[in-house]
Image (cartoon, helix red, strand yellow):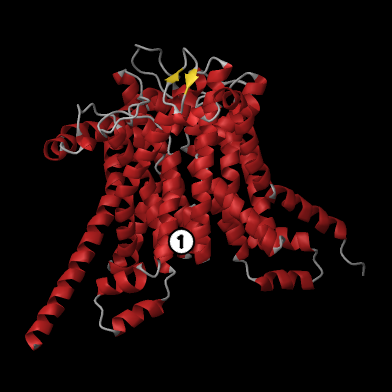
Amino acid sequence: MGFERADNHTWRKIKSALASGSAFVSAILVIAPLGLVFFYLLINGITSVNWDFFTKLPAPVGEVGGGMANAIVGSLELLALAGAIGIPVGVLGGVYFAEYGSARINSVLRFLADVLNGIPSITWGVVVYGLIVLRFKSFSVLAGGLALALIMIPLILRTTEEVVLLVPNGYREASLALGVSRWKTIVHIVMKTASKGIITGILLALARIGGETAPLLFTAFGNRFWTHSLTQPIAALPLQIFTYAISPYDDWHRQAWAGALVLVTGIFCVNILVRFLTRGRGAQVV
Amino acid sequence: MAPPSRFGDQAFEWLTLAMASTVVVLVILIGWELWHGSSLAIKKFGFHFLTTSTWDPVTEQFGALPFIYGTLVSSAIALIIAVPLGIATAAYLTELAPLWIRQPLVSLIEMLAAIPSVILGLWGIFVMVPWLRNYPFPFLKQYFGWIPLFTGPIYGPCLFAGGIIIAIMILPIITSVSREILRSVPNLQREAAYALGATRWEATRIAVLSYAKKGLLGAVILGLGRALGETLAVTMVIGNTPQIVASLFKPGYTLASVLANEFTEATTDTYLGALFEIGLVLFGITILVNLLAQLLLRTIATTSATRAVQ
């Protein structure tokens, strides 16, 4: 009898160890693609990341060399435009959620923001195509920037709300008690206290849309040359990577790997910066 | 002393309200634009659009069935792979792993989530698909070829490859939302199980996983929402052929991929209308799935779970 129980206990222990082991293997399998992708980006991309890559326009088909200067600048332009629209709307909207808004209105708006966050990014491309490109009969910087801005808004809105809610109520009360008006309290005390978190949310949103390709396919469209006006099509790094990856030319494939390496490095740098900003607070902010 | 002016307060409140209400405007805008854009196709094809499988821009015959099929099949493959792996990893991260290993693993998963779709697709075309074609696919064909799913010639780009790449894309979100759900399970649950003499795995299974069932379902459905809308990576490896076939080794096509590939090529109004309608179908499916996921996650009422969504 005692033997049986001991056996049973051992068996349960073994089972527990087996389960832990397979959960560990699962975790390894989940992160394996990260290592594999990074490894292949490095070995395939590093040789083509050179001075020309950052300073030259794409070479015509058949010619070796050239770079992605216009795509890198184009991506930055699109991000700046998207930020100019998306950041103020998202941050102020998030402040409304946290500071004003009755519980019922908030829960509806928050719900909608979360649903918007789950909509496929290509849908935004289709919407902006109908809204801007069809109307003005041209792919443009404006259309691309707007598509990215619309993706940003619900993202920033939610992160801003969360960090503003973390500001202790005593801060608000102290300021109001001194006779400072409510809006000045919010801007100078509450938003200032939460500024690190707000910036973190903005940076994460920028990193996210910086890699977006789907919403740019038929808004920004891409361009093999420099873009001189907001109403012309513009190149973007992820778009260029896509075009080159599905092309039949070896030289373009090499450029695609190089572009991907540069893009991922940029995105990882932002993520590390964010980690640096939020260090010590752990998972508390975002 | 005069009281502070009310005007500034009022103006600021309205300003922030206006910005917050963009979420309402955006939802209406998407619905209206997609409906408006596809009205021509809806009038012309009616309900048949969803049930016919001819997609021929030359004769202007458009049916979305092969795309709906491809989307559902590739997402199903993705879930079959990603759900057990994601939940097991989440359980590992919250219950089973040594403490020192948890935070680094979480960071790595966050980095995986940060990889853009197009870059995963690039890797998919040049690394993953050739490997699948040379090793796992012939193996499956040889030993499981009697199942219709694994028959026929192996091309490389196919529904199976599309499903695997989507699985990689949705693993981070399923894992991190599941992890938040498991973290929100009260410690009393675990303590009760250990007090009864449970082993670590028994406590995890009985006291934690089954307690969190509903939230985990929410995480899975959220992952499904992402899977259905995944575009670039899957476009690059699925083969882009509108057909309904049993074999997973054959190329397929998804709703999002046909938008990505053909939108700029649509030369006639009917063609463009049909593509808009594809967008409408995709929007309709993903919004339903997301609503369901939010409802399930909302009942858990953890802000941390919704935080992980982003």
Q: Nearer the viewer, residue A98 or A54?
A: A98
Identified at 32% across, 39% down, the residue is: B163
Q: Quadrant of residue A262?
A: top left
* Residue B233 appears in view: no
Spot occupied by residue A235 in the image (x, y as percentages of width and height): 50, 25
- Decide if residue A269 is on the left or right side of residue A183: left
Spot occupied by residue B304 in the image (x, y as percentages of width and height): 49, 63
Identified at 92% across, 67% down, the residue is: B2
* Residue B218 appears in view: yes
Spot occupied by residue B232 in the image (x, y as percentages of width and height): 41, 33
Q: Nearer the viewer, residue B129 or B103?
A: B129
Spot occupied by residue A45 in the image (x, y as percentages of width and height): 31, 31
Which residue has dot 1 on it? A279
- Decide if residue A178 is on the left or right side of residue A141: right
Kind of residue indicated by mark 1: Arg
- Judging from the image, mark 1 belongs to the subunit labelled A
Tag count in the figure? Answer: 1
Identified at 66% across, 59% down, the residue is: A106
Q: Secondary structure at mark 1?
A: loop
